[in-house]
Image (cartoon, helix red, strand yellow):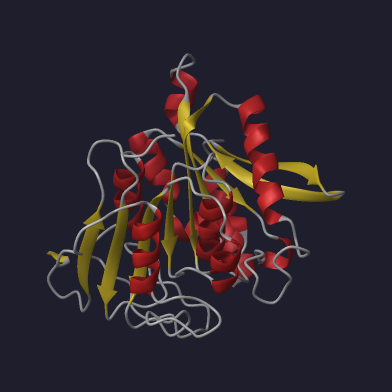
């Protein structure tokens, strides 16, 4: 499976050389990441570009995350750079299975990538965002908690707020927060897991309070889907339309541990159904584009 995916990635990325593998040394260890630049980056040499960090799930690679999420297509349409970092042993330090403070310094690695991007690319450092799937989504939430001065907004897929991040969250800066969660997810439960992570709705409430959003929570809005799609998607959003840090929850009824709009992906786990009602990349970019530092 991994060998086949690697061949597909090579086929997809070697024709237009827009995705390049880069590396840096952090804490005396060589770390890798893929940088994808849209074609507009070359044709508009005076322009700066937003950046989206896209973190892979546990057990996945940066190339598999690029292939599965297909975010490069959205990067072409909306003219932003995508970065796919590689975790050590295909994992991220979110406080599960390793010490939150003494374990792998993935936050420092992310900061090092961002510093290198500022040297090597024309990036708009007021429009830097992060997303991720599963463990990558948990880690994106850690970045929102620890580096809010650098990330304007974060979108987490299949990963509510981890308890270790909650316990260490000291920053007061507001961050745009989008949560995408399947209600039938059997890998990361919608209702949360005691001593591990909050529920999706509890995570929404946490960030709503953190961002200073007052008032009653409105009813979610149902989004129309294509005929024959067994899932149902609802959208809940609160926050100021005048440049404030918004909070949103996209709930997929009967949806699994999947990236909305992606091709079906079977890794031998009960990951469940993928909704066709929305494209996660388009939803994220629309949300991200409302936020700047």
Residue 233, given in percent of the width and then of the height, sits at 21, 69
Q: Nearer the viewer, residue 179 or 228?
A: 179
Q: Nearer the viewer, residue 144 or 225?
A: 144
Residue 125, given in percent of the width and then of the height, sits at 51, 30
Instruction: Identify the residue at the far right of this view.
Output: 28
Picture layout, residue 34 above or below residue 220: above
Residue 212, given in percent of the width and then of the height, sits at 34, 52
Relative placement, left or right, of 151 versus 190 is right
Residue drawn at point x = 12 percent, y = 71 percent: 227
Residue drawn at point x = 20 percent, y = 67 percent: 234
Residue 128, given in percent of the width and then of the height, sits at 49, 38
Residue drawn at point x = 31 percent, y = 41 percent: 244
Q: Nearer the viewer, residue 259 or 200?
A: 200
Quadrant of the frame with the N terminus? bottom right
Instruction: Identify the residue at the far top of this view.
Output: 46
Image mark count: 0
Relative placement, left or right, of 108 versus 130 is right
Asked whether the viewer can see residue 157, the reply is yes
Picture layout, residue 224 above or below residue 42: below
Asked whether the viewer can see residue 8, the reply is no
Picture layout, residue 247 above or below residue 45: below
Q: Nearer the viewer, residue 90 or 245?
A: 245
Residue drawn at point x = 69 percent, y = 66 percent: 100
Relative placement, left or right, of 45 versus 63 is left
Quadrant of the frame with the C terminus? top left
């Amino acid at each position: 499976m991994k060998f086949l995916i690697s061949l597909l990635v090579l086929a997809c990325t070697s024709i237009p050389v827009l995705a390049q593998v880069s590396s840096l040394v952090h804490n005396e260890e060589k770390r890798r990441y893929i940088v994808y630049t849209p074609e507009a980056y070359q044709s508009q040499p005076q322009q700066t570009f937003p950046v989206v960090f896209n973190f892979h799930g546990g057990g996945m690679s940066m190339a598999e995350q690029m292939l599965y999420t297909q975010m490069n297509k959205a990067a072409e349409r909306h003219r932003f750079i995508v970065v796919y970092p590689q975790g050590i042993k295909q994992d991220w330090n979110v406080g599960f299975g390793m010490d939150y403070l003494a374990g792998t310094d993935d936050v420092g690695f992310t900061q090092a990538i961002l510093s290198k991007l500022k040297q090597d690319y024309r990036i708009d450092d007021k429009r830097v965002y992060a997303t991720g799937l599963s463990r990558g989504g948990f880690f994106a939430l850690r970045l929102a908690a620890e580096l809010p001065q650098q990330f304007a907004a974060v979108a987490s897929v299949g990963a509510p707020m981890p308890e270790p991040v909650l316990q260490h969250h000291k920053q007061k800066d507001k961050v745009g927060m989008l949560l995408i969660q399947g209600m039938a997810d059997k890998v990361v439960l919608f209702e949360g897991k005691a001593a591990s992570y909050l529920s999706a709705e509890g995570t929404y409430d946490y960030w709503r309070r953190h961002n200073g959003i007052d008032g009653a929570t409105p009813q979610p809005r149902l989004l129309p889907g294509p005929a024959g799609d067994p899932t149902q998607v609802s959208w809940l959003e609160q926050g100021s339309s005048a440049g404030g840090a918004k909070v949103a929850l996209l709930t997929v009824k009967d949806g699994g541990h999947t990236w909305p709009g992606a091709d079906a992906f079977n890794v031998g786990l009960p990951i469940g159904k993928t909704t066709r009602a929305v494209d996660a990349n388009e939803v994220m970019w629309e949300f991200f584009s409302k936020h700047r530092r």
